[in-house]
């Protein structure tokens, strides 16, 4: 099985061992969908976004990738390119990552999981609208 996009079941949300952005009214808009691979016991959740159109800056999205109970935190910037005729492509630049010490010797596997999860997530949890997803890592300050 591979990563798929789904609505997060309410019962799962209650078990998350990490916090997400909360609106002033108490809602948690990032907790509606996730990208999950049940066979590998891994899921990706958007925890919050910084910047964007209202602030006049490139938006940075912050995620938690849970893999076998280990929480991997990372941040990245996404840009889309292409056209409706030729197809849209998404490019990610992951520039910050924190992984548990128990996964230090599995660095390449962690990077591959992030690539696969972001690819499957697509644009707004829709992979079919993209012809390609490219993920690059600039982690010189994270290691």
Image (tube, rainbow, N blue to C red):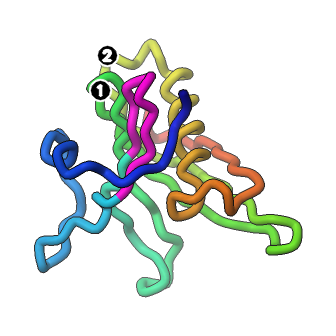
Q: Front-most of 57 and 72?
A: 72
Which comes sooner in the sequence, label 2 or label 1?
1
Q: Front-most of 11 and 20?
A: 11
Asked whether, in this view, residue 84 is left or right of residue 135, the answer is: right
Question: Marks 2/1: CA distance?
Answer: 8 Å
What residue is drawn where x is 74% and y is 60%? Answer: 89
> Which image quadrant: the N terminus?
top right
Q: Front-most of 128 and 98?
A: 128
**Is 36 colored magenta in this rendering?**
yes
Asked whether, in this view, residue 121 is left or right of residue 72, the answer is: right
* Image coordinates for residue 75, horizontal then vertical, percent: 44, 51
Residue under label 2, please give it: 102
* Image coordinates for residue 12, horizontal then vertical, percent: 21, 43
Cβ atoms under marks 2 and 1 closer than 8 Å: yes
> Which image quadrant: the C terminus?
top left
* Image coordinates for residue 127, horizontal then vertical, percent: 62, 54
Residue under label 1, please give it: 70
For the stretch drawn in magenta, the main secondary structure is strand
What residue is drawn where x is 31% and y is 55%? Answer: 47
What residue is drawn where x is 69% and y is 50%? Answer: 133
Element type where label 2 sits in the image: helix
Q: Is residue 2 above or below residue 125?
A: above
Say few, some or many: other residues with alpha carbon within 10 Å of mark 2 (under 14 / 14 to 19 / 20 or more): few
**Is 12 colored magenta in this rendering?**
no
Asked whether, in this view, residue 34 is left or right of residue 135, the answer is: left
Q: Give the foreground label among 2 and 1.
A: 1
User: Which residues lie in the magenta part?
Assistant: 33-44
Q: In the rendered structure, find residue 133 and report the number of the disc placed on it.
A: none
Asked whether, in this view, residue 103 is left or right of residue 23, the answer is: right
Q: Is residue 64 above or below residue 123?
A: above
Give residue 36's quadrant in the image.
top left
Say few, some or many: other residues with alpha carbon within 10 Å of mark 1 (under 14 / 14 to 19 / 20 or more): some
């Amino acid at each position: 099985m591979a990563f798929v996009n789904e609505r997060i079941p309410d019962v799962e949300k209650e078990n998350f061992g990490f916090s997400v952005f909360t609106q002033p009214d108490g809602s948690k808009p990032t907790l509606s969908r996730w990208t999950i691979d049940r066979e590998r016991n891994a899921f990706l959740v958007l925890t919050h976004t910084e910047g964007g159109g209202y602030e006049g800056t490139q938006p940075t999205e912050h995620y938690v990738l849970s893999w076998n109970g280990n929480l991997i935190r990372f941040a990245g910037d996404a840009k889309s390119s292409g056209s409706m005729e030729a197809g849209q492509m998404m490019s990610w630049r992951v520039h910050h990552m924190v992984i548990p010490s128990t996964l230090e010797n599995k660095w390449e596997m962690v990077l591959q999981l992030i690539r696969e999860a972001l690819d499957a997530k697509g644009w707004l949890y829709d992979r079919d609208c993209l012809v390609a997803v490219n993920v690059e890592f600039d982690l010189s300050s994270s290691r």
